[in-house]
Amino acid sequence: MYRRIVKKSTLTAGILLLLFCTAALSALDRQIVLGREDRWQDVSYTENLLMRKGRWGSQDLVLQEAEYLADQYTDLLVHFNGRPFQDQVGRYRVAEEDLLLSNHVVALGAGSGGFNSGNRGLHLVAEPGAAFYRGSWLRDFSIEFWLYPALLRDGEQVLLWQGARWNPDTVIPQELRCSVQDRTLVWSFENVFTEPLGQASSIRLQGLTALVPGDWHHHLLRYDSRLGLLEYLVDGLPEAVAYTTDSGLERGTVLQPFVGDAGPGQVGVGTGFTGFVDELRISRSFVQEPNLNRYSSNVGVFVSRTFDLGYTGTKLKRIDGVFRTPGDSAVYFYYRMTDRADADTSGVPWTQFEAGQPLGKTQLSGAATGNRGRYLQVMVELYPDGSRRHTPEVSELRLVYEQDLPPAPPTGLNAEAGNGQVKLYWSTVNEEDVGGYFVYYGTEPGSYHGRDSDLGPSPVDVGRVSQIELTGLTNSRLYYFSVVAYDATDPPHRSLFSREVSARPSSLLP
């Protein structure tokens, strides 16, 4: 019920329900709170998660956004998450960064690069081994980024590489430019694609769909060197196609891209552009399926550390949660408990539960291990919605448990001496889980190490009775006695000692 309330209503309803549950706690209930003030510090393992500022100003667990990851084909990768801006692969050196860092207008990750027409933008110098290092022959490549234009004025420049090549004694300028024209992006290549004999060509691709200011779109230019196919896509849909052949058609001699060695060249981003750029990546491959989703399909996992609840047999009553599941995103909760003294829960199966419901009654799946134990772990799984545009948000977990405390000590202990024996009797402890009593005896006050009795050495487990005769004691010797109650847990919890009494057996007594 709790989860449905949170899912169908607002987070406010979840907060009110949590406050109601908190107010209803019994005097014996204890709590462990995860999230909010402790910022989810009680963690042993996380995967595909990050923390984001929530409605309370504290940190919520959310899915990690599907930022690009560097692989064997990645030539350049700039996330724009923080300063200093840098290439994650290390093949390009930042020569200049005259741009803003935005943490509010973001496509993926924690930030984006903010540009305006008065800034010089970001300039990257190719190091040896980079695709755009001078003298490099390129084969398959892809250039992609997320773009959030603000003005879309003609001539705004999003990306620019300029170099030069010899042919054979003449320096020929080269250029790869991505700029704005008629509210679309235009890709132009000057003297980049060349014939085996050195004849260079000019190629131009222009998008068909007019862009809209104030909105993120994914742009991808990709090249297949085998076919000479140069293709431009917006949000995964083809916008323009060209063939880098001597005929300009699908058939013909394929011209290969060459980075000239007559000048160092630089990759410039955002010079004269107004808007935001995020997730700039150059790959030495023909990217088949661009990543257009904010989140991957991978589950996000949070596993808490193991909590010591203090006593074996402690009852986990329920686990309250404050969370949101926008769209058809989902959150699943699990716990596991054990009484093992080494606090190792790794071999205990997880039990799924519904947040806010009494445990032991509405367990949903898994090999239930029961909701009693001394050592406790919880796990949370977060799943994105079907479109992978929304993430669940988990603000807090509140673990409510009742310790299985030791029973109260027995009262009313009395001792009657006899011939070689002492009769003890006391009032039973009025608690349901009392398993029995230990009788302690000895010959010094507070020191119960006696071994004389026919019933065995101290302490003597007498079960659930409330009186006993200790026989085989030595006459004329003064003995001291105390009784301890224990409960039915394994191992049992023992009460404090009862009051101490003494008695001296004698042959003159019956």
Image (tube, rainbow, N blue to C red):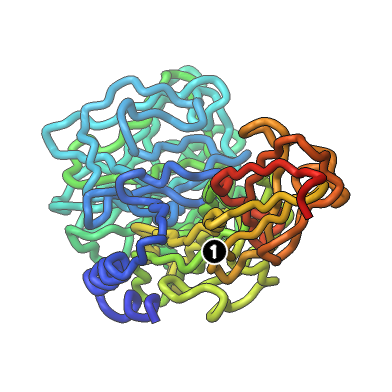
Q: Nearer the viewer, residue 23 or 430?
A: 430
Residue 337 visible: no
Residue 422, given in percent of the width and then of the height, sits at: 74, 51
Q: Nearer the viewer, residue 276 or 486?
A: 486
Q: Farthest residue to the front: give it.
A: 508
Question: Which quadrant of the structure image shows residue 437?
Answer: bottom right
Q: Is residue 238 left or right of residue 373?
A: left
Residue 4, given in percent of the width and then of the height, sits at: 38, 80
Residue 29, given in percent of the width and then of the height, sits at: 41, 61
Mark 1: give few (<14), some (14-19) or many (20+) Cα within 10 Å: many
Q: Is residue 126 left or right of residue 434?
A: left
Split into 4 quadrants, where in the image is the C terminus? bottom right
Q: Which residue is mark 1?
A: 315
Q: Is residue 466 above or below residue 452?
A: below
Element type at marker 1?
strand
Residue at position x 47%, y 61% from top? 401
Split into 4 quadrants, where in the image is the N terminus? bottom left
Q: Is residue 143 above or below residue 181?
A: above
Q: How many marks?
A: 1
Q: Amino acid at mark 1?
A: Lys
Residue 187 visible: yes
Residue 129, given in percent of the width and then of the height, sits at: 57, 25
Residue at position x 33%, y 38% from top? 80
Question: Which quadrant of the structure image shows residue 338?
Answer: bottom right
Residue at position x 30%, y 68% from top? 18
Q: Nearer the viewer, residue 205 or 147?
A: 147
Residue at position x 67%, y 43% from top? 503
Q: Nearer the viewer, residue 204 or 212?
A: 212
